[in-house]
Image (tube, rainbow, N blue to C red):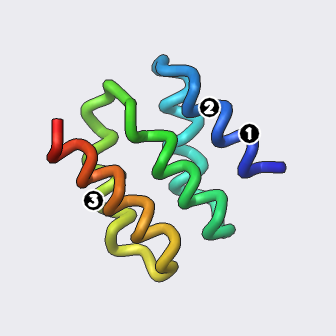
Amino acid sequence: MRRLAVIGLGNHKNAASFQALQNILENEKDDSVLAEAAIALQYSQQSQAKELIAKLQQDEHYRVVAAALEVAASWDNT
């Protein structure tokens, strides 16, 4: 259920949604929720999004790292 909520946050590209995603990334332990949060940052206009994605690339869970790498690669291709 938390994973679906994170997906919904990714659909809202505003400061409040970004703040909620940032809080999730700092406090969540479930790797599937963290991976979805990383993906939700893909279209973020916030400057801190790149810092968060870089940090997630060092996560202990492969799902989170893979999602963060996917987001970073999409930014490199634009």
Q: Which residue is drawn at 53% across and 54% down?
A: 25
Q: Which mark is residue 54?
A: 3
- Could you tell me which residue is drawn at 34 percent across and 74 percent down? 58
Left or right: residue 7 versus residue 15 is right
Binning the other alpha carbons within 10 Å of mark 1 as few (below 14), some (14 to 19) or many (20 upward) gives: few
Q: Name the amino acid type tagged 2.
A: Leu
Name the residue tied to disc 2: 9
* Mark 1 vs mark 3, CA separation in Å: 23 Å
The percent position of residue 22, horizontal first and vertical second, equals 49, 43
Q: Quadrant of the C terminus?
A: top left
- Pointers 1 and 3 in contact (C-beta within 8 Å): no
Q: Name the side, left or right, on which 35 lies relative to 33.
A: left
Q: Residue 53's image quarter?
A: bottom left
Tell me, for residue 5, which label it has, or none.
1
Q: Left of 23 or right of it: where is 33?
A: right
Q: Where is residue 42 in the image (x, y as percent from the top left)?
A: 39, 40
- Element type at mark 2: helix
Alpha carbon separation for disc pair 2 and 3: 20 Å
Callouts 1 and 2 close, C-beta under 8 Å? yes
Crowding at mark 3 (Cα within 10 Å: few <14, some 14-19, many 20+):
some
Q: x%, y% of residue 31?
A: 61, 69
Task: Identify whether 48 is placed above or below 61.
Answer: above
**Lower sequence index among marks 2 and 3:** 2
How far is the residue under mark 1 from the one under mark 2? Answer: 6 Å
Looking at marks 1 and 3 on the same chain, the residue that comes earlier in the sequence is marked by 1
Name the amino acid, label 3: Ala
The secondary structure type at the circle numbered 3 is helix
Q: Residues within 10 Å of mark 2 (few under 14, many from 20)?
A: many
Amino acid type for the residue under numbered disc 1:
Ala
